[in-house]
Amino acid sequence: MTAVDKTQNDVGTARHVAEREIVLAHGGGGQLTDQLLLETVMPRLSNPALDALDDGALLDPTGQDRVVMTTDGYVVQPWRFPGGNIGQIAVCGTVNDLAVSGATPMGISLAIIAAEGLKKKDLEAVLDSVAAASKRAGVPVVTGDTKVVGRDQADDIYLTTAGVGRRSPKVKLGIEHVRPGDVLLVNGPIGEHGLAVMLAREMPEVTSVLRSDVAPLNHLIAACMAELGDDLVFMRDATRGGLAGVAADLAAQSGYHVTLDEEAIPVRPEAQHAADMLGLDPLEVANEGKVVMVVREAAAEKALSVVRGFEDAELGGEAAVIGRVGDAADGVCELHTVIGGRRVIQKPYGEELPRIC
Amino acid sequence: MCLAVPAKIVAVKDEACATADLHGNQIDVSTVMTPDAGVGDWVLIHAGFAIQQLDQQTAMETWAVLNDLEPPPTQQAGPPT
Amino acid sequence: MNDLRSTTQRALDRLKRAADTLGRDVKLMEVCGTHTMSAFRSGLHALIPDNVKLISGPGCPVCVTAQGDIDQMIAISGEPDVVLCTYGDMMRVPGKHGSLEAMRCKGARIEVIYSTLEAVQLAQRQPNSRVVLAAVGFETTTPPTAAAIDAAAKLGLKNFSVLASHKLVVPAMTALLDSVGDDTTGIEGFLCPGHVSVIIGSDAYQPLIDTYRMPCVIGGFEPMLMADGMASLVEQVVAGEAKLENLYPEAVTPGGNPVAQELIDRIFEPDEVRWRGVGPIPGSGLAIRDEYAAYDARKVFALDDMPDREPNGCICGQVIAGLANPDGCSLFGTVCTPVRPIGPCMVSGEGTCQAWFKYQRPAIAARGRVAKEVVTA
C-alpha cells in the first residue's frame, strides 16, 4: 500500500474533511468556527452565560455590578509582524472583548506556551509588548502561567488569556436592543491587521507601509458609553471575519436587514491595493483595533463626533457611519456598492488564502 | 480569470527582477516577460510576474474618453496614476 | 453621486440605449473569472438592462480543471517526500478522496504559493524533498509556470517538477460554439478576458470573427469598463456587425507579449486536454515538451490518467459551458454551499456558483432554495 492509498483510505469517501477533522478554517472565526461551536461545543457545555455566545460572558446577572468574563487563545503566525506582535494582540484582544460587552476591564491573566529554543530576547520582546499594551489600556496582567513544549510541538510562542470586567447594571447593550433605523459606525480604516499579517506570513519579501491596527479600545468605548448612554445599543470588535463577519452576524442575529454603504467604509489605498494583489476583500480581513457600534439614528452625529474627537486620534480620527439597520425582517446583510449596485455580504468561510485567479 | 494589478517599478535589482510599488506595498517581481521595463515604468503584476508593460499614454487617453475625469486611485487593473 | 458612479452610469446609459434599440433579449458571455467577480462584487447585474444577459463562460481555471487532474494533484501530494506547491485557489477543490486541505490535515506537505518561483526556491533549499508545482490556469498563468521550469532547468534541479493543467482560451471558446452551436447557447457576443489578451494579443480572437461572426470586445475589469464593453457588443449586434474591439489598449496589443509567448512555446506544446463537464478538446491545452520531460510530474511520478467522474447531480460542466445557471442545479444552495462545496464552481472564489451564492442570496432565498445557514444566533 502506498502512502497515497493509505491516506485515501483514511479519508475514505468523505467529501468534506471539515466534518471529520479539525481544519485550519475551523479556527478562522468564520462559518466553520460557528459550525464547530454549534455542533460540537454547545451541546456539551450549554449554560445560560455561554449560550449568549457573546465575546464576554455575563456572570451573576443579578449582582450589584455584573461580572463579565472572556478568554482567548493567540497563535498568530508570524508572532512578530509590522505594527506589533502576539503580546499586544493578546492584551488588546482580551480588553476589547470585555469593552464591547459593556464592561470595564479589571484585570487579565496571561499563559505563555513557549516552544523549546525560543530566543530569550524574543520572549522579552513579547513581554515588553504585553507591558506596553497593558499600560496603554490601563488594565494589569494579574496572574499567569508558563509552559514549555518540545520544539516541534509548537511554533515559537502561543499565548492564552482570560479577562474579567465589571459592568454596570444600567448598561443596556445587546443584540436584542437593535432596531430598524439604527446606524452602524466603525472607528477607522479596515483590513490593515489581517493584510499586514498575511503579507508577513505569505510574502515576507514584500515591504509594505501597512501596519497592524492593534490597539486597546476600552477608553474609546468608555467615552462613547458615557456620552451616548442608551443610544449606543450594540458593539462588536471586527476581528477575524472582518467587517463582513460582524455585519453578517448583526443581520442574522437581530433578524433585520442590514445595509452597508461601500463608499462610506474607510479603506486606505495601501490596504485596498494589497488586498487586490492577494485577491482578498478588505471587508473580510481581520482587524485588531476596530469596533462596529450600532447607535440610534438620532445619536449618529453625536456618536461620530465623540469617536472622531477622542483624545487618541489614532483610534477614532477616521471614524465613519457605514450603514444602517433596515425594516425588512430577512436577516440579510447587503452592500450598496460604489457604482450603485447591490450585493449580499456573508460571513467568510474561515481561512483566508491568497488567490491569483 | 487572472488577477493582475498595475504597479510602478521603483528599482531594478537585476536583469530578471525588479521592485514594484503598489501604493505603499513594495514587491519583488520577475521581469523576464517585460525586459524593457525600467524604473518609473508601469507594469501589470500577476502572481509575482510583470506580464506587460503598460502604455501610459494610451491608458490616460482611454480613461480620459471614459471619464473626462481623473482615474480613481484605488481600483484594480486601473491605469497608472 | 460619486465620480465612479457617474462614469459607470454613462457607460450603462450607452448600454441601455443600444439594448433599447435592439428591442429584444441578447445573451453575452464573459470568459474570465475576474470579470465574474467584478460583476458580482460591484452588483453590476442589477444595473444592466433587463434584456441584456451576461453569463459566465469557462473562465475560472479552478472550475474547468478536470476531476481527474484534481485527483492527480491530490494523489501526488500523498507521495513520500513530496512538497506540493499550489495557488491558494486550489486548496479546497474536492477530489474523489478529499481535497488538498484534507491531505494537509493528514500530514501531506502542501505549500500555498503566490509566485511559482517560490516553489523553485523551496526545491533549492530542500534537496531531500521532491517539490511539485501543481499549476492550473490560462495563458496569463502559463508563463510563470514556464519560467519556473526554465529556472529549474538552468539550476539543474533534480527535485522539482510540475503537474501542469494549463488551458488555452480561444480553442475553448470555439469548442463552445462548435459543440453546442450558437443556436443552443444563444451567445451573441464575447467579452474577452483582459489579462489573457495581454499575453495572446487581440489578433488571437480573429478566428471567432472570421469563422463564427461573433462580436468580440476585450474589456478591462472595472464595472464601468465591463459596461462599456457590453455596450460595444450590443451595438455590434444592433448593426449586424462582428468585429474585434479592444477597450483595454493600455495593456493589450494586437500581437500580445512576444516574450511571454516565446517562453510558453519553448517549454510547452499544444495538446488535447480535458475540460470539466466538456471533456477532451483538441489543441485546447498545453503539455510540457519532451525536452523538459524531467520536469513533468506526470512522467516523473509515472502517473496514469485518472477518470473524470463528476459528483452525482453536479452540473458544473453545464454551468461552465453557459448552458445552465447555478439555480438549475438540484444541489445548489442546499447540498452544495461554500462551506460544503460539491462542485468546483462552488469552491472557487470566482466560480459562478459561489458568486451566485455569496452575492445573490436574497433572490435565491425568495425562491425558497437557500440552505439553512449556520449562524451564532
Image (cartoon, coloured by chain):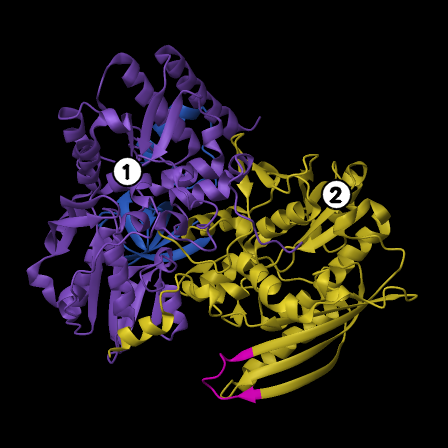
Chain colours: A yellow, B blue, C purple
Q: Nearer the viewer, residue C275 or A311?
A: C275
Give the CA distance from mark 1 to mark 2: 50 Å
Q: Please state the chain letter of the residue tagged with numbered disc 2 in the rendered image.
A: A
Q: Is residue A155 located in the magenta-colored stretch of the structure?
A: yes
Answer above or below: position of C132 versus C345. below
Look at mark 1 in the image and give the residue it sits on: C321
Look at mark 2 in the image and give the residue it sits on: A304
Q: Nearer the viewer, mark 1 or mark 2?
A: 1
Residue C2 x, y percent position in the rendering: 56, 28
Would you say the residues marked 1 and 2 are in contact, meaning their CB atoms lie under 8 Å apart?
A: no
Residue B39 x, y percent position in the rendering: 32, 49
Residue B52 x, y percent position in the rendering: 27, 44
In the image, farthest residue toward the left: C291
Q: Quadrant of the N terminus of chain C?
A: top right
Dot 2: what SS? Answer: helix
Q: Is residue C30 visible?
A: yes
Instruction: Name the mark on residue A85.
Output: none
Density class for disc 1 (Cα within 10 Å; few <14, some 14-19, many ≥20) is: many
Q: Which residues are magenta?
A: A148-157
Answer above or below: position of C123 versus C186. below
**How many numbered marks appear?**
2
Answer above or below: position of C321 versus A126. above
